[in-house]
Amino acid sequence: MDTWVWIVIIVAAAVIVAAALGAFALSTRQKRRDETLRSEFGPEYDRTMKETGNRKKAEKALLGRKERVEQFHLKAISQADRERFLSEWQGVQAQFVDAPGQAIGDADELVGEAMRARGFPTGDYDQRFEDISVEHPYVVQHYREAHVIAKKNKAGQADTEALRQAMMHYRELFKELLNAPERGRVPEEMAPRRQGGGERRTA
């Protein structure tokens, strides 16, 4: 066989191998990105996938959320504000007995105040849900479901049981907001002991 034929065969084989390696590397990077986003967003990853119907669109949307929230100056709620919020929440819960509809509206406003205290903007609700999903992916669905019931309540379409469920949903996010540490700081209960080298017990 002529030398030039061997050269063509070798070059073609090299191109095929390079293409295969490139595809493998791309697939590996994609898999790692998928795993990272799944880990960070939890159930919100699957929800966004279902909503967009496309993995690339879902990933672009989630990465966009992260980039937006990274611009926020998120902080832990101060002890004074935390005590005030807890006191106001107790008042809202007590109000629910006699005026559940009003209590739901007040709970929604109180959650919004807690968001602002953490450093989240409180524009339209769709944007709120997306922002909250970055830092609190496991409770954002509670916020969505509470808001749906709150809208039905304004339209006179929510019964007492639905309002009770809304209060429970609001409470889950409210607790997370009040107990969230400053971004980048390990919560105290998760920090290693300074003495003895052991781990702190969780509360």
Image (cartoon, rainbow, N blue to C red):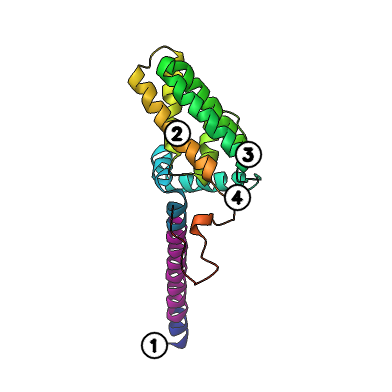
- Residue 74, relative to residue 27: is it above or below? above
The residue indicated by pointer 1 is 1
Q: Given the image, on which type of amino acid does mark 1 rest?
A: Met
Q: Which residue is mark 2?
A: 171
In the foreground, 193 or 111: 193
Q: CA distance from mark 3 to mark 4?
A: 16 Å
* Label 1: how many Cα within 10 Å (few below 14, some 14–19, many 20+): few
Could you tell me which secondary element the residue under label 4 belongs to? Answer: loop
Q: Residue at x 51, y 29 (%)?
A: 89
Q: Which residue is mark 4?
A: 182
Residue 113, relative to residue 105: is it above or below? below
Q: Amino acid at mark 3?
A: Ala
Q: Position of residue 125 (x, y in %)?
A: 53, 29
Nearer mark to the viewer, of 2 and 3: 3
Q: What kind of residue is marked 4?
A: Glu
Distance between mark 2 and mark 1 Cα atoms:
79 Å
Measured in 3D between alpha carbons, the distance from the residue under mark 1 to the one under mark 3, in whole angstroms, is 86 Å
Circles 2 and 4 in contact, beta carbons < 8 Å: no
